[in-house]
Image (cartoon, helix red, strand yellow):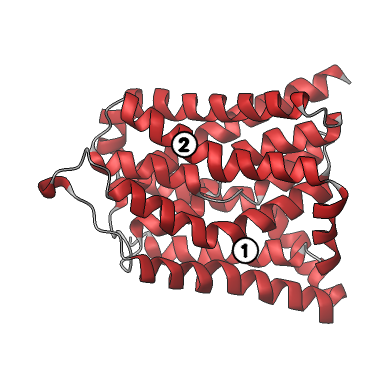
Amino acid sequence: MNAILIVLPILSLLMFDLGLTLRVSDFGLVLKQPRAVMIALVGQIVLLPLLAFALAMAFKLPPEFFVGMVLIGCCPGGSSSNVFSMLAKGDVALSVMLTALSSIITLFTVPLILQWATQCSMFDAQNSIHLPVGNLLVQNLVLMFLPILIGIGVKRWWPVAAAKIEKVLSKLAFPLLILLATIFFIQHSDTISNNIALLGVCVTLLLICATGSAALLSRLFKLGYRQRRTVVIEVGMQNAAQAIAVASSPFIFNNDTIAIPAIIYALMMNIVLLLYVGKIIAKK
């Protein structure tokens, strides 16, 4: 089975679903909650890629895993974060807006960060990984930005139909991600099993450091408890489907091995954040 034929439609479907939840007025939250927005975006777009880069260097990951770690670190928030925020009694409107903002901003930051990662001085000519920046920009615009715009348009002009479609798609987001990860686990079971100890520790540290930093910054800037929970979830919940799409796309890396850190991250982020949400629910 060619996994890319499943990855690309799933990514576009998730972005369309995100668009269905958005209204132009939602972006007004940037003015109403500027501290929460800035902390979340700095955590996700600046801190997370830097942590991924530092851990990949510290663990001396091979080039393909190195790029894969940075890739999952610089992707936008995942659409499942909205569901997690709701379960944690967080600020769901803030979560939706942050996911949308990070998805738009990273259309341009992902190519820049990945180009930096692939040109890292630790790679020699033999181990270099080429990044076609133009192809990455085009794929992101077609598979992510365009579906978001279509979703917003459907919600604007056909709100009743949009609500019905979103109700179905919101329930499919998590199962689709698990399906995607399962397919990759099966296809690359040997590579994953041989590197699960190294990558598992590296990815889990990335997740813990990122969410811990988000929690600390949220407290330092005195965000409300609902905002704090949302910021922690947004920083930790990454769009693994996009990372897998970039890694395995024949137009970009065309290398499933680069996707393996994202697959492991998808598993660990759901475990860690479900424990986080469960702890919050247990306190009530």
Q: Which residue is mark 1?
A: 15
* Position of 242 relative to 12 (above/below): above
Residue at 62 percent across and 42 percent down: it is 42
Of residues 214 and 220, which is closer to you in this image?
A: 220
SS class of the residue under badge 2? helix
Q: Is residue 266 visible?
A: no
Alpha carbon of mark 2 to alpha carbon of mark 1: how far? 25 Å
Asked if the residue at tag 1 contacts the one at tag 2, i.e. Cβ–Cβ closer than 8 Å, the answer is: no
SS class of the residue under badge 1? helix
Q: Earlier in the sequence, mark 2 or mark 1?
A: 1
Q: Which residue is mark 2?
A: 50
In the image, what residue type sits under mark 1? Met
* Position of 153 relative to 207 (above/below): below
Question: Residue lying farthest bottom?
Answer: 157
Quarter of the figure that contains the C terminus? top right
In the image, what residue type sits under mark 2? Leu
Q: How many marks?
A: 2
Indicate the quadrant where residue 212 lies.
top right
Q: Is residue 118 rendered to the left or right of residue 284?
A: left
Residue at 35 percent across and 49 percent down: it is 116
Q: Return the x and y of residue 107 as percentages of the image width and height.
A: 53, 62
Instruction: Judge the density around disc 2: few (<14), some (14-19), many (≥20) Cα neighbours within 10 Å.
Output: some
Residue at 56 percent across and 53 percent down: it is 176
Q: Return the x and y of residue 277 as percentages of the image width and height.
A: 73, 28
